[in-house]
Amino acid sequence: MTERGGRLAGQVALVTGASRGIGRATALALAREGAAVVVNFREQAEAAAEVVRTIEEAGGRARAFQADVTDAEAVRRMVEAVVSFYGRIDILVNNAGISRDRLMVRMREEDWRAVLETNLTAAFLCSRAVLRPMIQQGYGRIVNVSSVAGLVGNVGQANYAAAKAGLVGLTKTMARELAAHGITVNAVAPTYVEDTALFHTLPHRVKAWALTIIPMKRFARPEEVAAAIVFLASPEASYITGHVLVVDGGMTCP
């Protein structure tokens, strides 16, 4: 894990919600490809520090940065700090997300708003903040972490599915707006992913049911989603934009 080698050598990546789960796996994978990684977190300072330590012990470069990505001013300060320290920002992974599952008839307005703000508005705020430096560079990669729930819906997740579907629309719109500036915008849409906060909240019966509709008969691992994200952030994906890469073990096959 060294900045001198790898497909992303010399690049700078910001990963939101990177202290655990998919965000952690993505930060480690980007660092292995040579990128200097900014590990964003809101509350999990110890976990974020562990991610940074793991990257540095393997010879990579990383910094942790605390910021609530639903706060526009906090996001602006974070991106300014990244550009000031590294001189550039090449990759943004909008990964931060929460779930507040409940049947719609019982869903509270505060749970609707909280999920939309964290899972969708935060991606808008972070993306908007990095656009000026990326446009000035004439280069950038933005990858949004959506979900198959945003493609096909899911019982008890009206807020989560709506936010993840919104990410798909945001991805495609930004892709059209930014293509001429050398910036690609794509999304990944995973299914149930082990070792994530969302997965640990699922009842056993839901996990058992999910295995019956996933052809591969297992759940995704964070590293498998991270691999898709790294690909979309890499030079090999230079002619791919506005795409949603589904990582679901065949669950949504027609």
Image (cartoon, rainbow, N blue to C red):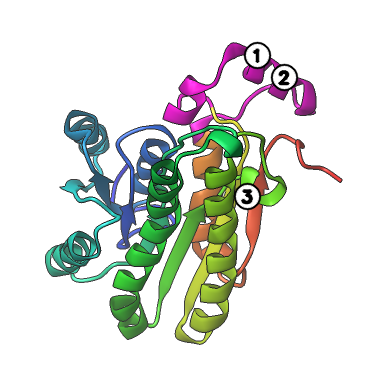
Q: Is residue 164 left or right of residue 64?
A: right
The crowding category of the residue bearing disc 1, from other C-alpha atoms within 10 Å (few below 14, some 14 to 19, many at least 20), is few
Residue shown at 45% from the left, 64% from the top: 142
- Residues in magenta, as a range: 194-222
Q: Is residue 77 left or right of residue 159?
A: left
Q: Position of residue 167 (x, y in %)?
A: 53, 59
Does residue 249 sit above or below 235 in this rendering? above
Q: Find disc 3 in the rendering and name its residue.
A: 150
Q: Tell me which amino acid carries mark 2.
A: Trp
Residue shown at 26% from the left, 46% from the top: 39
Query: Disc 3 and disc 2: Cα gap in Å?
Result: 19 Å
Does residue 200 sit above or below 189 in this rendering? above
Quarter of the view holding residue 168: bottom right
Q: Find disc 2 in the rendering and name its residue.
A: 209
Query: Disc 1 and disc 2: Cα gap in Å?
Result: 6 Å
Give residue 205's mark: 1
Q: Tell me which amino acid carries mark 3.
A: Gly
Q: Are marks 1 and 2 in contact (CB under 8 Å)?
A: yes
Q: Position of residue 90 (x, y in %)?
A: 35, 67
Indicate whether residue 163 is drawn in magenta: no
Q: Give the number of callouts.
A: 3
